[in-house]
Each structure stands twice: as structure tokens, then as C-alpha cells.
């Protein structure tokens, strides 16, 4: 079947109309939401029935999964729209996500290798030489943590150390290896004041230890370690032990001068910093993450690679990194959410953990499962992480202004009804 010139032109126009219409609808929705918020708050209390959050069905306030309530960058959506008609072709790495990452994270990259034709970085047929950068890109940071587990734990005779109230992905993989009969030891070190106890974690290292995991800011507690604490810890860890520093939520730290662990990963061969596009960039369904680490760590991980991030995710990720307005807006929404909850929880007399992330944990003073069920019946989803250790606590993820208002209204009502 062949296409006429008219059909080709019509297709191009349809694509442009699709993109223009989609972006315009998104802008209109934002304005409508603002007007609806002002009108509803003036007339009475908001309920979940008044809500249609971005990326979720109407009438549901989803504040359980640490998602971004404002959605992805418009530039990311534009990049997806501009590339989605190319998915019938294999992708060989168009764009420069490595350069965008380097600029965003403040890392100087070596120049790309020369091509066989004398240019830079590209071979005939669209293939590239592998560029040596500190970035290891994967289909989500969860996939990266799984690769770390495979590379460093799956042969047995190994050990992983993690905080008992940390994210727990690597130690969870280790449990699977144990069930398969492998000799993998798991050491979970108690937290101190809801923070990683790095001295205790250092003291737990044995000759069998292969991996130590730090989640910073921590999930689910939202607490933060200083750069100096981590630097001291890394310097004391044996060089044969991999230190994983999971910085999925690092972009929500309040202090704009906070120093991340990037320089530890670029200076030490046994440190990897893991990052994700699921949080501040608002793209969990795209599955895009990356690590910052040495070439030695990359080679070990690459041996266990089962695939890579898809072309649309890479294009959207590169565009997101270049959209500072969306990045700053995501941070501002989370900051407003945290400030509002701290103020309300204090008025309600509830204990909470001040958070450096896009979620907060609060002690309701009564079994949290009963309250969660009551809230879900009213259209509000929250969660209770570490239920055995903290049976009266919930973790609530950031919402926009309207969703946060509904959460507080429903929480107050549920607290009055449950025992």
C-alpha cells in the first residue's frame, strides 16, 4: 500500500493538531481546577467527589504511592508526542540524555569517542560507540536495584545491610534468593530517631558483606542524612563493599544548598547513587531511572542487564531535565503540602515526622488500618508502611492543594468515627 502526498500532509497536520490540542486541554484543566478550588472552598468543605486529579479517575484522591500530583512536564509530553509515531522503528539512542543528566547533576563528561568516519560518537547505520559516562540508565530505579541485587548477591555467600525502616528493595530481593536456597544473609539495622544509624550499620559489616544500602531521604520516614555523615561512612566502608545510596526523593530536600551524594559516586569506585524520574519529574509509568557510578560497577551491572529504557521514556526524560519551571513547581507543591500538614497536625495534637520527601508519616494514636478503611470509603487512599513496628501510623503522599484539603477533611471525620 502506498500513501499519496495529500495523505502524508493530512497525517502531519493530524499529529500537530493532536499535540496542540492535548497541551491546550492540559492548560485549561489547570485553570478550571483553580476556579473550582476557590468556589468550593468558599461554599463549604471539599470532598473526593469534587476532585479529578491528574492521571487518576474522578472522585479518587490517591495519596498512597508517593506520586507527583501535578503530572509530568509539558515538555516531556511534547517529546512523547513528537516521537510516538517513530515507535515502528528501532531506536539507536537519538538525543543526548547523558548530556542533559550531566548538566542537571553538575557533572563534567569526557568528550564522546570519535566515530569510524572521523565524526563524534556515531557509527554507520545509526549505531553509537558506548560513551563512557558515570550514568547507567535503566527502565526505572527499581530495575536498577534489582540489577544490583543480581550482580552482588545472587551467587550466594553474600550479605546485605539495610536499615530496618528503609525502602527495603534490595533486602527484599535477598529474601527471594534465600527462598531459592542461596546463602544470602540479611542484616536490618534499627533506625535512630527515625534516621539511618550509620555507626551501627558500619559496625554490622562483616567479611561476608557485599552491599550496604542507604535511602536518603529515607522512605518511609522522610528523614535526611547530611553529606558529611555519608562521606564519613563511605570513607570507612571496605572498598570491596558496594554502598548504594538511593536518592529517589533527593529533589524535595528543603535546603537549596544541600549537597547530594553525587561526588561520592564519582570519587569512589564502590559507591552508586540511584535516581528516578518517577517522583519530581512525575513519570512513574514511563519507567526511567539511572545510577551514578564508576565504570567498574557499570561493567558488573551490565553483565546482568535484560534490557534498557524505551525510546519514549528517554526522550521524555531528556526534556524533563531541561524544564526547570516544572521542576521548581513540583518542589513548591510538595513544600506547600508539607507546611500545610505540619500546621494541621500540630493543631490536631498528632505526632508526625518532619519530612524532606514528598510524603509524611503521622501517628493517629489508634490502629491505622481502621482509619484507612474509613478514609477509602470516602475516596481517599493513604497507606501504613511498617505496620508491625508502627501500627498507629500512616504515610500520606503529597497532593495538590485540593487533594490535601480533601485528605484533611476526611482524616478528621475518620478520626472521630473510629476507635
Image (cartoon, rainbow, N blue to C red):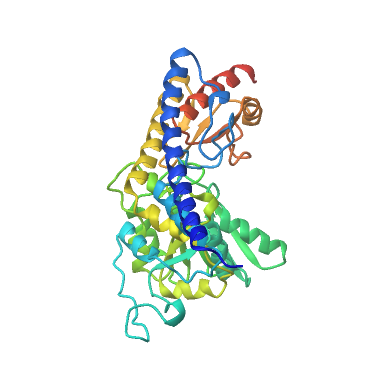
Q: Residue at x 47, y 66 (%)?
A: 242
Q: Is residue 277 visible?
A: no
Q: Residue furthest top?
A: 43
Q: Residue at x 55, y 57 (%)?
A: 142
Q: Nearer the viewer, residue 335 or 342?
A: 335
Q: Nearer the viewer, residue 234 or 167?
A: 167
Up/down of 326 relative to 1, above or below: above
Q: Quadrant of the C terminus?
A: top right
Q: Position of residue 247 (x, y in %)?
A: 43, 53
User: Going by the image, does 372 lie left or right of 337?
Assistant: right
Q: Is residue 366 visible?
A: yes
User: In the figure, residue 342 lies in which quadrant?
Assistant: top left
Up/down of 123 relative to 76, above or below: below
Number of residue marks:
0
Up/down of 343 relative to 299, above or below: above
Q: Residue at x 36, y 40 (%)?
A: 329
Q: Quadrant of the N terminus?
A: bottom right
Q: Position of residue 187 (x, y in %)?
A: 57, 57
Q: Nearer the viewer, residue 254 or 368?
A: 254
Q: Residue at x 48, y 76 (%)?
A: 299
Up/down of 322 relative to 97, above or below: above
Q: Position of residue 230 (x, y in %)?
A: 38, 56
Q: Position of residue 29 (x, y in %)?
A: 46, 33
Amino acid at each position: 500500500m502506498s500513501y499519496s502526498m495529500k495523505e502524508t500532509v493530512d497525517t502531519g497536520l493530524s499529529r500537530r493538531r493532536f499535540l496542540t490540542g492535548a497541551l491546550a486541554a492540559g492548560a485549561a484543566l489547570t485553570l478550571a481546577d483553580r476556579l473550582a478550588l476557590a468556589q468550593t472552598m468558599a461554599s463549604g468543605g471539599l470532598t473526593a467527589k469534587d476532585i479529578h486529579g491528574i492521571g487518576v479517575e474522578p472522585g479518587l484522591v490517591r495519596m498512597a504511592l508517593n506520586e507527583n500530583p501535578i503530572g509530568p512536564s509539558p515538555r516531556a509530553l511534547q517529546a512523547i508526542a513528537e516521537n510516538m509515531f517513530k515507535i515502528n522503528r528501532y531506536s539507536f539512542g537519538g538525543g543526548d540524555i547523558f548530556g542533559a543528566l550531566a548538566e542537571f547533576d553538575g557533572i563534567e563528561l569526557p568528550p564522546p569517542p570519535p566515530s569510524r568516519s572521523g565524526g563524534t560518537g556515531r557509527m554507520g547505520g545509526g549505531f553509537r560507540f558506548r560513551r563512557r559516562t558515570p550514568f547507567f540508565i535503566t527502565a526505572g530505579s527499581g530495575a536498577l536495584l534489582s540489577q544490583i541485587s543480581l550482580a552482588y548477591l545472587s551467587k550466594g555467600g553474600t550479605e546485605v545491610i539495610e536499615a530496618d525502616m528503609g525502602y527495603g528493595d534490595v533486602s527484599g530481593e535477598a529474601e527471594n534468593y534465600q527462598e531459592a536456597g542461596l546463602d544470602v544473609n540479611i542484616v536490618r539495622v534499627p533506625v535512630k530517631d527515625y534516621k539511618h544509624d550509620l555507626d551501627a550499620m558500619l559496625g554490622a559489616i562483616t567479611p561476608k558483606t557485599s552491599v550496604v544500602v542507604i535511602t536518603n531521604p529515607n522512605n518511609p520516614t522522610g528523614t535526611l542524612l547530611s553529606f558529611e555523615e555519608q562521606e564519613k561512612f563511605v570513607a570507612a566502608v571496605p572498598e570491596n563493599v558496594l554502598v548504594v545510596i538511593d536518592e529517589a526523593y533527593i529533589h524535595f530536600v528543603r535546603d537549596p544548598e544541600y549537597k547530594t551524594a553525587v561526588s561520592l559516586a564519582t570519587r569512589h569506585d564502590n559507591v552508586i547513587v540511584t535516581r528516578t524520574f518517577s517522583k519530581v519529574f512525575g513519570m512513574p509509568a514511563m519507567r526511567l531511572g539511572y545510577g551514578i557510578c564508576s565504570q567498574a560497577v557499570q561493567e558488573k551491572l551490565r553483565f546482568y542487564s535484560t534490557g534498557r529504557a524505551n525510546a519514549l521514556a528517554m526522550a521524555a526524560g531528556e526534556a524533563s531535565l531541561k524544564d526547570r519551571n516544572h521542576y521548581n513547581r513540583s518542589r513548591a507543591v510538595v513544600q506547600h503540602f508539607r507546611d500545610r500538614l505540619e500546621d494541621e497536625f500540630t493543631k490536631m495534637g498528632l505526632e508526625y515526622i518532619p519530612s524532606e520527601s514528598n510524603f509524611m508519616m503521622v501517628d493517629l494514636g489508634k490502629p491505622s488500618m481502621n482509619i484507612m478503611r474509613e478514609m477509602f470509603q470516602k475516596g481517599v487512599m493513604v497507606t501504613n508502611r511498617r505496620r508491625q513496628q508502627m501500627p498507629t501510623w500512616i504515610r500520606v503522599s503529597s497532593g495538590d492543594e485540593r487533594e490535601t484539603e480533601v485528605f484533611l477533611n476526611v482524616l478528621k471525620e475518620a478520626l472521630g468515627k473510629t476507635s
